[in-house]
Amino acid sequence: MKKVRYAFTMIELLIVIVIIGILAKFGTELLLRIYEDYVVGTVNNRLLSHSEVAVTQIANRLQYRIRESMVVHQNGNIAPIANAVDVKDAGTAFEWVGYDVDGMRGDKGVTPPTWSGFIDVDNAARSTTNLVSPGSDWNRITSVITSLSPNGVVAPALFFVGDDSIHVMNGFGWLGALGTQNGNMHPIRVGAGVDQFAPTVGNFSGINVYEYYRLAWTAYAVELFADPIPSDPNRLSLRLWYGYQPWNGETYNQGTKQTLMQGVTSIAFATIGDTLKVQVCVGDSKLSGGTGAFSVCKEKTIY
């Protein structure tokens, strides 16, 4: 009986070797592409999530801004924000004064607002040293500001709605403390009664006093700053400053800081009338070789 031997022919072996070679080449590339897509997708989702949080925190504070107060610190200069400003360099900051929305709203209907937003311009008690604000209570104003202020300082100021004598640079304190009541902000303290405001500097003689006002106790700054790490020596990050009063001569680096986002590639503000857009772009140095070329952007529109 003839013994049967089972084996591959040379042609079969060559075919198998060719197939294995094809799979090794294209299969590895396919797996690598799938892995790269996974990594890029994961990083992209993370950056989108983080940038959304950062731009939302900024937008929430900008929603209650005094529109006329916005300025930008760039290249050692301070100027009002006009049209669009796109920043990619460390040491640049955007600043604005925000009014006290918590005190204006009160405690969800449980307690009334601490300040009413109205000045009784016809009240006989008005003088050069007192403004009557019906419905306001200085004791409750002090309580709210003390609880919100990081350092417990109560140093508010009024901004009259409708004031058309806007002089941004020296009217809000961006160039130094206000020594008179001739600016946009009017530093105040308690007056003859809890519903009356007295000036902390100068007096209201010859000052245009309007019926409506906003009360502010802090300015805000969003700063792009150098934040290097060994794997990314050129990394920039974004932080928020608050709890300082420019009308009293304070600058933003005297306030309280909070880091909003790391790995920021740019931040931009654009104004169109009373509408403001803010955009934050963030990158990942590991995917871009430290150049920040891989980045995503989120923007918000604030009315």
Image (tube, helix red, strand yellow):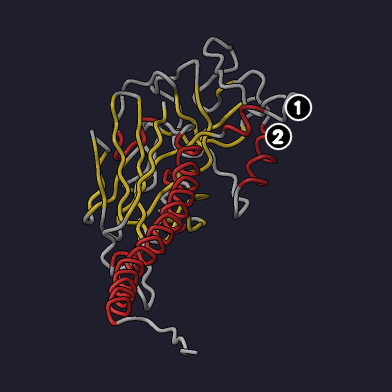
Circles 1 and 2 in contact, beta carbons < 8 Å: yes
Q: Judge whether residue 8 can be spotted in this image.
A: yes
Location of residue 77 in the rendering, given as x and y in whole percent from the top left corner = 22, 51
Q: Nearer the viewer, residue 222 or 169?
A: 222
Mark 2 element type: helix
Q: Nearer the viewer, residue 277 or 240?
A: 277
Q: Which residue is mark 1?
A: 111
**Whether residue 137 is situated above or below residue 172 in the rendered picture:** above
Residue furthest front in the image: 1
Question: What amino acid is found at the position of numbered circle 1 in the picture?
Answer: Thr
Residue furthest top in the image: 122
- Residue 164 is drawn in which quadrant? top left
Q: Judge whether residue 226 can be spotted in this image.
A: no
Which residue does the image show at 31% across and 78% down from the upper left?
Answer: 17
Question: What amino acid is found at the position of numbered circle 2 in the picture?
Answer: Arg
- The quarter of the picture where the C terminus appears is top left
Mark closest to the chain's N terminus, 1 or 2: 1
The crowd level at tag 1 (other Cα within 10 Å; few <14, some 14-19, many 20+) is few
Q: Nearer the viewer, mark 1 or mark 2?
A: 1
The crowd level at tag 2 (other Cα within 10 Å; few <14, some 14-19, many 20+) is some
Location of residue 80 in the rendering, given as x and y in whole percent from the top left corner = 27, 38
Mark 1 element type: loop
Location of residue 143 in the rendering, given as x and y in whole percent from the top left corner = 70, 41
**Whether residue 17 is situated above or below residue 200 in the rendered picture:** below
Q: Which residue is mark 2?
A: 140
Which residue does the image show at 67% across and 39% down from the upper left?
Answer: 144
Judged left or right of residue 234, residue 229 is: right
- Residue 33 is drawn in which quadrant? bottom left
Q: Nearer the viewer, residue 202 or 268?
A: 268
Location of residue 69 in the rendering, given as x and y in whole percent from the top left corner = 36, 35
What is the CA distance from the residue labelled 1 to the residue labelled 2?
10 Å
Which residue does the image show at 70% across and 34% down from the upper left?
Answer: 140
